Image (cartoon, rainbow, N blue to C red):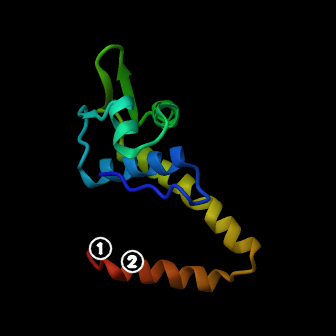
Amino acid sequence: MFSLDIKGSEPIYTQLEKAIVRYINLGVFEKDSMIPSVRSLALELGINPNTVSKAYKNLEEKGVIYTVAGKGAFVNGGQSLSGIKKIIVENIKNPLKDAKNAGIKKTEVLKIINEIWEENNSD
């Protein structure tokens, strides 16, 4: 289910956090539904359980998931869509700053954004 770029520059735990948020937004993980356990997800992905644990801890701190001792991790039923959007905005800011620092003009970035929105012309 999860696709991670092990050789990429982005930390695996960050990729995992983004993937979980994406699946929540897509409705794959619904409110109060259980997400895979740390151990089972680590085995499935072939990564260290500490990496999955770190991603889950970060998502819990952000209010996206909650854990129940002895039961597992669940999608936070109280997590509003605006809270998830806030996380996504945080994840967009650094690449935009990198683009600005690399001398990419605002008009070029806006062109890319418009192209992405046109791909899924469902708005």
Give left or right: position of 19 versus 15. Answer: left
The image's mark for residue 111 is: none
Q: Is 17 rendered above or below residue 40? A: below
Under circle 2, the secondary element is: helix
Residue 75 in view here: no
From the top left corner, tell me how far across and down residue 95 is, in percent: 62, 65
Sequence-wise, which precedes: disc 2 or disc 1? Answer: 2
Where 87 falls versus 42 (above or below)?
below
Q: Are marks 2 and 1 in contact (CB under 8 Å)?
A: yes
Q: Position of residue 54 (x, y in %)?
A: 53, 33
Q: Which residue is found at the position 45% from the left and 82% from the top?
A: 114
Left or right of residue 94: residue 68 = left
Residue at horizontal 29 percent and vertical 73 percent from the top: 123
> Which class describes the residues within 10 Å of circle 2: few (<14), some (14-19), or many (20+)?
few
In this view of the protein, which residue sits in the foreground, 52 or 118? 52
- Residue at the image point whose x is 45% and y is 47% from the top: 16
Q: Is any part of residue 65 visible from this angle?
A: yes
Amino acid type indicated by mark 1: Asp
Mark 2: amino acid: Trp
Q: Name the element at disc 1.
A: loop
Measure the C-alpha gap from mark 2 to mark 1.
8 Å
Which mark is on residue 117?
2
Q: How many numbered tags mark residues here?
A: 2
Question: Around disc 1, counting alpha carbons within 10 Å, would you say few (fewer than 14), some (14 to 19), or many (20 or more)?
Answer: few
Nearest to the eye among marks 2 and 1: give it: 2
Q: Most extreme residue toward the top, as rendered?
A: 70
Q: Is residue 82 left or right of residue 122?
A: right
Report the front residue among 33 and 117.
33
Write the residue at 59% across / 55% down: 10
- Location of residue 29 in the rendering, given as x and y in whole percent from the top left corner: 26, 43
Which label number is shown at residue 123? 1
Q: From the viewer's perspective, is residue 110 above or below residue 101?
A: below
